[in-house]
Amino acid sequence: MSATYFQLYDKSVDWWCLGAVLYEMLHGLPPFYSRNRSEMYDRIVNKPLRLRPTITASARDILVKVCRS
């Protein structure tokens, strides 16, 4: 694979991924999930993170902080 396929990223990507895993552990599906891949990518870029009202305040705080990066 050519180097043009890879983009540099910083630690914020790692934090976002950690948040996505935590979200999936709490909700059963990844954040912004859609069966349509294009729609899922659009949600990631353009939609706010939605959390269930039953999520504890501490879990909500962590998810909001790591997924907003």
Image (cartoon, helix red, strand yellow):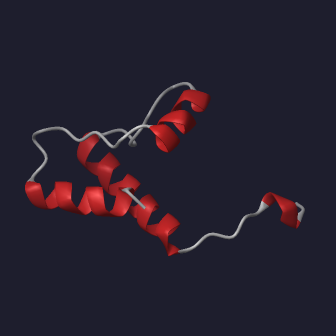
For residue 23, side relative to residue 61 (left or right): right
For residue 58, side relative to residue 7 (left or right): left
Quadrant in the rendering for residue 19: bottom left
Q: Position of residue 47 (x, y in %)?
A: 41, 37
**Location of residue 66 with respect to 42 vertically, above or below:** below
Which residue is drawn at the image coordinates 72% and 64% (left, top)?
7
Quadrant of the rendering where the N terminus is positioned: bottom right
Which residue is drawn at the image coordinates 51% and 25% (left, top)?
35
- Toward the front, the furthest residue is 46
Quadrant of the rendering where the C terminus is positioned: bottom left
Q: How many marks?
A: 0
- Toward the bottom, the furthest residue is 11
Quadrant in the rendering for residue 59: bottom left
- Toward the right, the furthest residue is 2
Q: Position of residue 32 (x, y in %)?
A: 42, 37
Q: Position of residue 55 (x, y in %)?
A: 13, 47
Q: Nearer the viewer, residue 61 or 1?
A: 61
**Location of residue 43 with respect to 66 vertically, above or below:** above
**Location of residue 26 with respect to 36 vertically, above or below:** below
Which residue is drawn at the image coordinates 12% and 61% (left, top)?
58
Which residue is drawn at the image coordinates 56% and 25% (left, top)?
36
For residue 34, side relative to residue 57 (left or right): right
